[in-house]
Amino acid sequence: MRETFGRRLLLFGLFGCLLLFFMSYYKWSVTQEQKKLKQEVRKQLLRELCHDDKNLGNIAQKDLRHLIVNDKHGIIYCFIPKVACTHWKKVMYVLKQNEPYPDLTSLQNVSIHTGNKFSFLSSFSKTEIKVRLKHYTKFLFVRDPFVRLISAYRDKFRKNNQYFYENFARDILRLYGNETNPPKTVKEALASGLHPSFHNFIQYLLDPKTERNEPFEPHWRQMHRLCHPCLIPYDFVGHQETLQEDAQELLEILKLHNDIKFPPSYVNMTSPDSVMNWFRTVPLEDRRRLYKLYERDFQLFGYRRPDELLDG
C-alpha cells in the first residue's frame, strides 16, 4: 500500500513539474511573440507613413552625424538628446573596449558627450555608408514629443548651464520675456530668479525667425529630422516609455545581454497630469501651432494626439 502511494506521489510530482515547465514555456513563447508584434507594429507604421519620401541619396552626409557606428559588432545607433541617449552612448562606448566590458555604472567620470569617442556615419564615404546601412543592425529610441520638450526645457533653462544661457536663454529673455538687458552669466540670472518661462521657450520655437536663422538645436529638433526614419530602415524602434523592457529586448537581439547590463532608469517625472500643468501657461493657439511643428514625430512614432491640450 505504501509503495503504491509512493509511486502515485512520484508520478503526481513529475506531472506537476512537467505542467509547470509547459506553462513557463508557453508564457515565454507568448511574451516573445508579443515583443515581436510590438516591434512589427512600430516598423509597419513607419513603412506606411514613409512611402512617399525620397531616397537616401538625397540626404547630405552632415545630416548623418547623429548615427554612431560600431564596426566590431555591426551596430548603428541614432542618438536623440533627451531620450536615454546618455545610457546608450555608454553602451556604444563600452563596446569599443576590450572584453569583459566595463560596467556602465563605472563610467560616471567619463564625459560621454564630448571628445572623439565615436565613429559617426557621416565620416564614411557614400559607398561605405550604403554597405553599413544594408548589413548593420540599426536602432533608435524615441519619446513623446511634448514630454521631450519639457525635459529639454527643464534641463537646459532651469539649471546652471552657461552654454545654453549664453547662446539661447538670454535671447529668449530679450525677445519674449521683456528683459531688455538680462544678466551676462547664468549664475547671476539664477541668483535673481531669472530664467525663460516655459511659454517663452515655446514662443521661441514657434517664431519663424528661429528656424530661418539656423536648424533647431538637437535637444529640441524634431526626432525624425535627427534620425531620418523614412530614409533609413531601422531594425529596432525603442520607446522611452518602455525603456527597460525595450533595452533588454534589444540587447538580446544583439546577443549582448550576457555582456552588458543596462542601468535602471529613474521613474519618468513627467506624468500626463504634469504635462497638463506645464502647458497651462501656454495659450491654446500656441499649443496647436506647437503640435503642428512636431506632428510628424507624433505620427511616425505612434504617439497619440494630446487632445486634452489641443481641443480646449
Image (tube, rainbow, N blue to C red):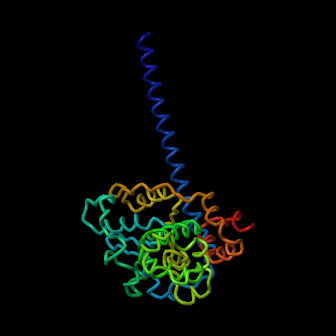
Question: Is 91 drawn above or below residue 60 in the view shown?
Answer: above
Question: Is 88 drawn above or below residue 227 in the view shown?
Answer: above
Question: Is 116 drawn above or below residue 10 in the view shown?
Answer: below
Q: Assign the C terminus to one quadrant of the image.
A: bottom right
Residue 280: name its quadrant.
bottom right
Report whether 113 appears left or right of 213: left
Report whether 290 appears left or right of 88: right
Residue 298: name its quadrant.
bottom right
Residue 244, given in percent of the width and then of the height, sits at 46, 56
Question: Is 148 drawn above or below residue 34 in the view shown?
Answer: below
Residue 212, given in percent of the width and then of the height, sits at 57, 89
Instruction: Between residue 301 and residue 233, name the one nearer to us.
Output: 301
Residue at 29% over, 59% down: 106
- How many discs mark residues in the rendered view? 0
Residue at 42% over, 54% down: 264
Residue 256, given in percent of the width and then of the height, sits at 36, 59
Q: Assign the N terminus to one quadrant of the image.
A: top left
Residue at 45% over, 77% down: 164
Instruction: Between residue 117 and residue 27, name the one nearer to us.
Output: 117
Find the residue positioned furthest to the right: 312
Report whether 200 appears left or right of 67: right
Instruction: Between residue 17 and residue 93, name the one nearer to us.
Output: 93
Residue 29, given in percent of the width and then of the height, sits at 51, 49
